[in-house]
Image (tube, rainbow, N blue to C red):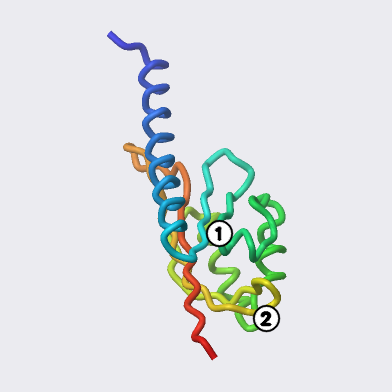
Amino acid sequence: MADASSVKLSSVKRETLDLDAYESALDEAEHLADLGGIVFRLGDPHYRLTGLLQRACGLPQVGLDVAARIFAAISHPHDAAETVRLLRSFERFDPYDGELRLSVDGTHRRFHLRTTVVRAAHGYPTGIVGLAEDVTTPA
């Protein structure tokens, strides 16, 4: 019979594999389209940014302690409330679906961001994954 520590270890391993699968799917989607991705793992002090979001922030990962300042700096001034809503969704492990204008390569572009919370079998969150799609209308 398995003891409690081996059951807990196998549960953690399964949860990590679930989040790895989401992260792998994000990487694949980014190769197919000009998208940005965001991954946050519970217990990791950083968000991993890829594609368009990495170019916007200029960093492959953003520390939790500076994420608010960085997103505020690259967000359009009129999108301040929406930026706060996005960051609060991360803090609360809530899904997010909304649009923000972010500065990428010196111009503001409109992004539709969607995140989902990855949950363990017992329902507690293990991370957040999301995609950012550039929906800027060509001039």
Judge left or right: residue 82 versus residue 16: right
Q: Of all residues shown, which one is farthest toward the top?
A: 1
> What is the x, y in percent for residue 97?
43, 68
> What is the x, y in percent for residue 133?
47, 69
Q: Which residue is mark 2?
A: 77
Residue toward you, 81 or 58: 58
> What is the x, y in percent for residue 59?
68, 55
Q: Closer to the N terminus: mark 1 or mark 2?
A: 1
| Residue 9, image quadrant | top left
Q: Of all residues shown, which one is farthest toward the left?
A: 1
At label 2, the amino acid type is Pro
> What is the x, y in percent for residue 129?
46, 53
Name which residue lies at 51% across and 81% down. Answer: 136
Quadrant showing the C terminus: bottom right
Name which residue lies at 60% across and 69% down. Answer: 84
Judge left or right: residue 77 versus residue 121: right
Label 1 vs label 2, nearer the camera? 1
Q: Secondary structure at mark 2?
A: helix
| Residue 53, image quadrant | bottom right
Q: Which mark is residue 51?
A: 1
Question: Dot 1: few (<14), some (14–19), or many (≥20) neighbours within 10 Å?
Answer: some
Give the Cα separation between the discs numbered 1 and 2.
Answer: 23 Å
Question: Dot 2: few (<14), some (14–19), or many (≥20) neighbours within 10 Å?
Answer: few
At label 1, the amino acid type is Gly
Name which residue lies at 49% across and 85% down. Answer: 137
